[in-house]
Image (spheres, rainbow, N blue to C red):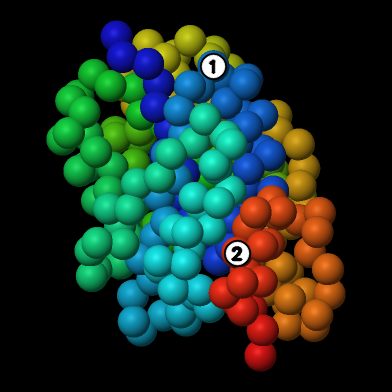
Amino acid sequence: MSELHALFGGTFDPIHFGHLRPVEALAQQTGLQKVTLLPNNVPPHRPQPEASADQRVDMLRCAIADLPLFDIDTRELKRDTPSWTVATLESLRAERGAQQPLGFIIGQDSLLSLSKWHRWQDLLSLCHLLVCQRPGYPTQMASPEMQRWLDQHVTHDVQRLHLQPAGHIWLAETPLVDISATEIRRRRHHHQSCDDLLPAAVIDYIDRAGLYRD
Ligand code: ATP
């Protein structure tokens, strides 16, 4: 059996400690050895990230330079279609084979809006969902149907994540880190400090590139 490998998708405009700290704790709890960051492609008709795709990847590289847990996969940026997680997981599944345990990491806010994702019902046939807590978001799903779906799939047995290729939801007990990329961009535009919100190497990059300034 291959070991559990997790993917973590996001816009990362920019990456911050609200991404890194909960995922590091999740990895410790579940015995994850590798987390692949998947920066997403934002289609032209949607509000664009302030940083370019190359800059978002550069910031990921700065953030993980000393963190061997992480690597980066830029496949979503190479497509000109929206980043449908289900399509990305299908391409990874095709590469890795049916037996490879795959986890897809999301924050609690993403879990709450999961029913808006393209083909969300197919996700658990492709991966486990590994959910990090996020302050300010309810722990209950918005509808009784979604709550039932969640209850049916939640596991408290970490071994299942390693022994089965997909199909379970793990609600991790991760630190509550009250940081968003939106708040970082807002602070930068107001010339306020972001020192405790993201790695120093990423702040240096942002300064050098003149990002998130009017
Ligand atoms: P923005 O403020 O621009 O919407 P964001 O800070 O929410 O961005 P994203 O890149 O959109 O960051 O998030 C990628 C993933 O990380 C999502 O699954 C989201 O739920 C999760 N995430 C982001 N911030 C946190 C946080 N502080 N705690 C837990 N999960 C988070």
Three-letter residue code for mark 2: Tyr
| Res. 202 image quadrant | bottom right
Relative horizontal placement of residue 178, taking residue 10 as reference (left or right):
right
- Residue topped by disc 1: 31
Q: Is residue 86 visible?
A: no
Q: Position of residue 41 (x, y in %)?
A: 35, 66
Which residue in the structure is indicated by mark 2? 205
CB at mark 1 closer than 8 A to ligand 1?
no
- Split into 4 quadrants, where in the image is the N terminus? top left
Label 2 to label 1: alpha-carbon separation: 31 Å
| Secondary element type, mark 1 | loop
Q: Is residue 196 left or right of residue 169?
A: right
- The image position of residue 208, as x and y in percent, is 61, 72
Which percent across, then down, holds residue 167? 37, 27
Discs 2/1, front: 2
User: What is the total number of numbered labels drawn onto the structure image?
Assistant: 2
Marks 2/1 in contact by CB < 8 Å: the verdict is: no
Q: Circle 2: is it few (<14), some (14-19), or many (20+) Cα within 10 Å?
A: some
Mark 2 or mark 1: whose residue is earlier in sequence? 1
